[in-house]
Amino acid sequence: MIVQGAGMRGTKMKTVRRKPLKKRGKRKLKSVVWYTLMLITLSLTAWGYRYFDNYLQTVSGTFELQSIKISGNDILSRAEVLKLLGLPARGQKLLEINPAEVQKKLKRSPFIKSASAVHSLPSTLRIHIVERKPLAFLYGRGLNLVDREAFIMPVPALSRVWNLPVIRNVPEKLGIRGAVSTSGMVHKAVDIIDWINRLDAPLPQMISELDFTPGNYIKIYLRDGDTVLRISENDYQRQLYKAAGFFKEYVDFKQLDQIAYIDLRYEHQIVVKEKSKS
């Protein structure tokens, strides 16, 4: 007779299923294969790198420089660029020329804002230059050029016509060539000229000089005769915008030489003063 105790009544029996040994063996095999493939891939990559490095070391003495292609230069001539580099036009080992060193040498020129150099196998060095674009002449201790960043450059030796306004009578130290001007007034002058160049014609083509002689206003001389625009230092954008519309719509250019000055500093009017008749 089998007697079942009361304490065993209602007891649930749990069944634990074990994974088949076959499946666990397959997973282990997959892991081994995966790690093996990874090791082979890494080994091949390292071998390929060493092979390519050895190849470059071998061919570096093979490719000779046969030509230098230069683009982007306008102010500087090809001969001046080559002089900066100190490279022969041909004959040097191409891959021995360091592009970073080429850039460094080129940027010693005050006319070059940025430069890039790349090897073009089998025999060409390609150089691209971004030159600084002169915005105006700057007169003080001689004649210089400035760009939109107020970077001071010498006037280049090449013979060309620069149709640019002149900044003069700045009562501050200007700074040195090959660097951004230390003068706040030079920066102000550059901002004024840059703003004028964005306005409607014919005003941008009419500007001859910006005169910063100390006083109550800035004087802008026009190319036709000695007519002067008077503007304030702080509200020049609104005043010059008003001047652009005035010259576009109302000015008789045949009579411009009869005008002494045009005062733009007033809120709702433009004051035109004619020259006194002698």
Image (cartoon, rainbow, N blue to C red):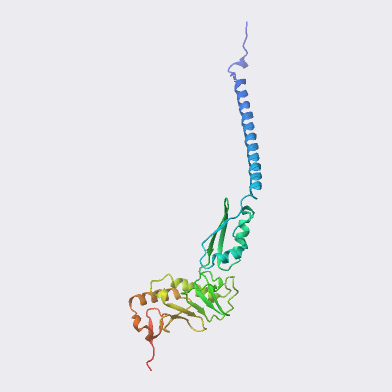
Identify whether 50 is placed above or below 73.
above
Residue furthest to the top: 1
> Looking at the image, which residue is at 59% across and 23% down?
23
Q: Quadrant location of residue 12?
A: top right
Report the residue at 44% width, 77% height from top.
Answer: 207
Q: Quadrant of residue 27?
A: top right
Q: In which quarter of the image is the C terminus?
A: bottom left
Residue found at x 40% / y 75%: 203
Q: In this view, does 140 lie to the left or right of 234?
A: right
Front residue of 17 and 120: 120
- Looking at the rendered structure, the number of numbered marks drawn on it comes to 0
Q: In which quarter of the image is the N terminus?
A: top right
Seen from the viewer's position, the closer of residues 236 and 204 is: 204
Query: Picture coordinates of residue 11 (x, y %)?
Result: 59, 18
| Residue 234 placement (x, y as % from top left) | 48, 76
**In this view of the protein, can residue 107 be seen by the observer?**
no
